[in-house]
Amino acid sequence: MSGRDILTVYAKELRDSLRDRRTLVSMIVVPTLMIPGIMLIAGVVLTRVVRKAQAEVPAVMVVGGGDSPAVRSALAGNPKIRLVATAPDWRQRIIDKQLRAAVEVPAGFDVMLVRGEPATVRLYNYESELRSGLAVGELRRFLTEYRDRIVTARLTGRGLPASLVRPFEIKAENVAPPEKVGGNIVGGFIPYLLILLCFTGAMYPAMDLTAGEKERGTLETILCSPVARTDLVLGKFLVVLTTSLATVVWSLISTAATLAVGGLLLAGSVGGAGRAGAPGAGALPTIDPFGTLAVLAMVVPIAVLFSAVLMALSLFARSLKEAQSYVSPLIIVVILPAMMGLLPGVELTAGLALVPILNVALASKDLVSGVFHWHHLALIFGSTCLYAGLALAFCVHLFKRETVLFRS
Amino acid sequence: MIEAWHLTKVFRDRKRGEVRAVDDVSFVCRPGRIYGLLGANGAGKTTTLRLLATLLRPTSGRALVAGHDVVTAPDRVRARVGFLAASTALYDRLTARETITYFGRLNGLSEARIADRIGQLADQLELHEFLDRRVGKFSTGMKQKTSIARTLIHDPAVLILDEPTLGLDVMAARAVVRFVRGCGADGRTVIYSTHVMSEVEKLCDVIGIIHHGRLVAEGTLAELRTKFGQEDMEEIFVRAMGGEEVP
């Protein structure tokens, strides 16, 4: 093996690749536009949708309660809901989103309250539908207050303090630092995106430097030079790895810039109400910078694995088109474990630390929150390096097989 | 010098089974002489030359190129060989100078030596005008000149040329023929495969006719004319193959 030859091949292939518009698009343009595109557009759209939904006075129907004017008039007096005339098809109207929620008042409700008899008020909504959720939330808040007022009145009537049934108040406060909260919010999403970009960054150069060269006839040209096949494949592999990692680094820079700019814009738009690092209305989450660097370190062996596997598969193909047909299904193989890392409740274990891609996705979720489980990280780094090494060795092996190089 | 003894290459094909692309071929190419390997498409010319250029490994038999065994010392063979084929293309996104420099570096030449050789080859092949332009925008002739410069950058003792005029226009093909003749005159060992009879007549000192992987006839043009009782190279070729056959 000659370092000089590897470097010569690397320098030439890198120059060649950087002159290729398609490589530049996958390496720079996609991460530059994709991450701000996804984060800003999705953020703006989501904010607008939520604000619009919050501004809307939801249509609510009271079902029953014709003999309970007190609760009906109290509901009618709530400016945050709009009561509509009772109709028998209220369920269908909720499903059709013409009605946001319905409140069912039992017969004789007002009288039952006066007598102190137990009663149940039912709320009906369209679960997972934003506006319906907001409407039922408002109804719940209103009815809880209504109930509290009755309880207080009853206690006062008996000469008892309100604290009799409410001996203490409950207030929740976040103690987790902003980056940990942010890590939980975007922790799964960022590694997922990085893993995907790491793969797509390597995809085109891997195909171009192997199947593409076969198709164009330049592979035979280089094979008849005295450079050793191992040096040749390592030089090419390093270029694929470089573009893959460059895509990841570029997307990280792009994410940081998007978070910074998006945070400023949102902070400005809500008059400074959104404190940086405190996720909530008007603030973008922050993530732990050391954790993010650690994610980058974990992505390196993944990039080696992707680069070697993509090169091996592409090398087997006779043309770019054939290579695309081999490589495209692999995206699913990459996305599935990366997506599993996004699922709530899936925690990193020693067993899962050996599952490629999923292990990095799960570890990254902790890392961007600033949580370092060193034994798991060592296991992940070691196993991924091993898989990457095996994939690279296989790629070198294929490069020495004439049935692969001159497959026709 | 190229020496081949009982060179054989067998491919295993799913549909056709065992294919003997090169079958027990023996010949010698001497320095300063141009050996023409003549054969129809699929006769085994390219496989023979790929074996000599160490791109493929022989199934059996032995070959020495510039004194080095193609199986045991392939790197040494490649360092002494210039291989040019219709199928060996150039990098479209590199300039001619970058391409030639790249192959110079891979052949272990110093930067000073590469610059010196590029100067010589540019003079010889009239490359100066397009040396710093990207190959992708070249005409076929310009590409072929660049390929020749790439092949000769390390001043190889042996040239293996596989149908180098395939697909070229008349002027570009003439330039290649001129270049090959010059290489023979320089004392290099040249093996040249083609199925163009006129090129063989013009260029080759020794002609080997290959058919179904076997060397069916060999000799100088005069010897072949005497042996087959024909003046025309095409007739000699057809007779050597055993007559006309419909594939």
Image: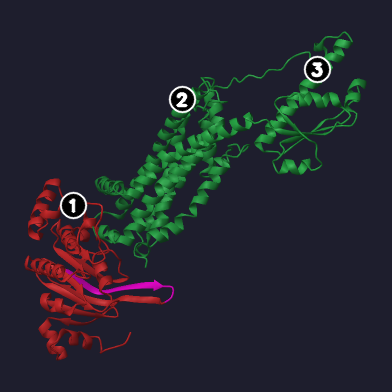
Same chain under badges 3 and 1? The reply is no
Residue labelled with disc 1: B133
Work out which residue is located at the far right of the displayed protein and give it. Answer: A115
Q: Position of residue A339 (x, y in %)?
A: 56, 43
Residue A14, position as x, y percentages in the image: 29, 46
Q: Residues within 10 Å of mark 3 (few under 14, many from 20)?
A: few
Can residue A378 be seen here? The reply is: no
Residue beneath disc 3: A149
Whether A146 is among the magenta residues is no
Give the alpha-carbon distance from disc 1 to disc 2, as whole Å: 48 Å
Q: Which residues are magenta?
A: B2-15
Mark 2 is surrounded, within 10 Å at the Cα level, by few (under 14), some (14 to 19) or many (20 or more) other residues, namely some
The residue wearing badge 2 is A264
Q: Nearer the viewer, mark 3 or mark 1?
A: 3
Colour of chain A in the image: green
Label 3, label 1: how far apart the Cα atoms are: 87 Å
**Residue shown at 33%/46% (left/top)?**
A239
Identify the residue shown where x is 30% and y is 52%.
A232
Q: Amino acid at mark 1?
A: Arg
Q: For the residue labelled by badge 3, is the local secondary structure a helix, a strand or a loop?
A: helix
> In this rendering, would B170 be left or right of A370?
left
